[in-house]
Amino acid sequence: MTKSALAAFAERLSITDWKDANLTVFTPSRVKTELLSGLTVALALVPEAVAFSFVAGVHPLVGLYAAFIVGLVTAVIGGRPGMISGATGALAVVMVSLVASHGVQYLFATVVLMGLMQVLAGIFRLGKFIRLVPHPVMMGFVNGLAIVIFLAQLSQFQVSGPDGGKAWMDGWPLATMLGLVALTMAIIWLMPKITKVIPAPLAGIAIVAGIVIAFGIDVPRVGDLASIKGGLPLFHIPLVPINIETLQVIFPYALILAAIGLIESLLTLNLVGEITGKRGGASQECIAQGLANTVTGFFGGMGGCAMIGQSMINVKSGGRTRLSGIAAALFLLAFILVASQLIDQIPLAALVGVMFMVVVGTFAWHSLKIMRRVPMTDAIVIVLVTAVTVYSDLAIAVIVGVIVSALAYAWNNASRIQGIASISPEGNKVYEIQGPLFFGSADGFSEIFDPAGDPDLVIVDFKNSRVVDQSALQAIEAMALRYEALGKTLQLRHLSHDCHRLLNRAGQLIVDADDDPDYGLAVDYEVKPGFFGGGH
């Protein structure tokens, strides 16, 4: 098969990079790296999926099936090779109230509807709006998520208390657990310096698990969480009444879950893209997440989205193609079907060590150094998004960060509006407007003028300004009416053609002059009585 044929084949599969379909790049070394990366990710997925199942109040297999199906579908058709998806805590915390009040079948129906919403978001290309997320919000997002991943691991240092509740480890059990975690982290740090034949996280898990099993060390293991043994997920339609009452129950949850899932997935898409040097794929990722969740709902899974922690494990272990994600999903299914007893013996300390290294690698440590050098508003946004991510959830944190950043931007631009007044040789007063004219600067624009003291002809030059929105139009109209009431004439100069289009869309009577310059600026538009009144 020629390169051009492979490129066409990849395009039909909606694969971003044709090399993903080029079998010649899958040398034995590359295949080994991808498979071992997938195995490492699969091992890290097990306790996460089980824990998030407990959070949502469903059976562990519901979370494991979600991790398998969502991971497999998104690995095959997702927007970024190397990304890992599965059951996540951000979605689980939303699901818990639905499961508690209506049962797991309503959850499956909600996941199906959630997936359909995400598919529509991809079809209408809503994923492109992720580019509106400022860099300080991204930094706050990764910092907050790193802290959340760290805090989530602390539950592994708890044991069942005498009253049936949870109690923190102490004494020798705590020391043993911490020692094994530290050993795992040390192996992950040292292994790349020795050899890169085996991914460092996998080496850490294998060595620590071997020590624990060989010496019979009594520490918590994966099997202590729950048994992961099960069969293949079976297709079934969610057992809920198909009527408007059911829709009223599941629609709000589906909408929230769809939004959270897409936000986390698209932010992870950008983060993985920065590491792998790839861009784009937002709409494709939306569709992939939607199809994955729709399928998951019909096969008894709790739904999911991209997982930044496991994605970082995969990328840092060398996973760069779709093979690693596919392998991770298939390894996870194999654990469920035939290898549950072996996986049950893996010490949780080894997996905690892996996740702690993910925290170290995910946290934007340089953000601590630049806090004093960036604008105060950016520093506030970083801290705010980090805090909201930790204490609330990712979607709210990103929305809050974007709103605060937008308001700060609007305030800064509002303060830039000013007018430089001068008298022309003909005795007319000229106001040269500096800065954008929009809702935030409309009041400042009005304060520039002196209608009572100005001569009969006043010229407003917008050469160094830009009319942006309806509030700007209203500000110009209000100023024109003030001069009109005093029997004076107002002229507008250097309004660009895009300003003309904006004025025309707003119902204003603007006509291009024959002597407009070639660079697209309109010159000398005279504001006469009734001009802004809309009566022409």
Image: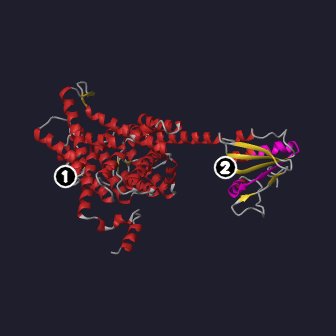
In 3D space, how far apart are the residues under numbered discs 1 and 2 (Cα atoms)? 63 Å
Q: Is residue 390 left or right of residue 231?
A: right
Determine the residue located farthest toward the bottom in the rendered image. Answer: 2
Front-lying residue, 503 or 139: 139
Quadrant position of the N terminus in the picture? bottom left
Q: Would you place residue 514 above or below residue 267 in this image? A: below
Q: Residues within 10 Å of mark 2 (few under 14, many from 20)?
A: some
Q: Would you place residue 11 above or below residue 206 in this image? A: below
Q: Is residue 346 left or right of residue 106?
A: left
Q: Would you place residue 49 above or below residue 5 in this image? A: above
Q: Is residue 233 left or right of residue 209?
A: right
Task: Residue 132 in the image: state x and y as whole percent.
Answer: 52, 48
Residue 421 in view in this figure: yes
Are dots 1 and 2 in contact, CB under 8 Å?
Answer: no
Task: Residue 391 in the image: state x and y as whole percent.
Answer: 42, 33
Mark 2 secondary-structure assignment = loop
Task: Residue 211 in the image: state x and y as whole percent.
Answer: 14, 41
Task: Residue 368 in the image: state x and y as whole percent.
Answer: 42, 37
Q: Tell me which corner region of the image, top left, top right, bottom left or bottom right, holds residue 190.
A: top left
Say which residue label 2 marks.
468
Determine the residue located farthest toward the top in the rendered image. Answer: 163
Amino acid tagged 1: Val
Residue 176 in magenta stretch? no
Residue 102 in view in this figure: no
Single out the mark in the foreground, 1 or 2.
2
Mark 1 vs mark 2: which is more N-terminal?
1
Determine the residue located farthest toward the right in the rendered image. Answer: 487
Q: Residue at x 44, y 49 (%)?
A: 262
Say which residue label 1 marks.
338
Range of residues picked out in magenta: 476-502
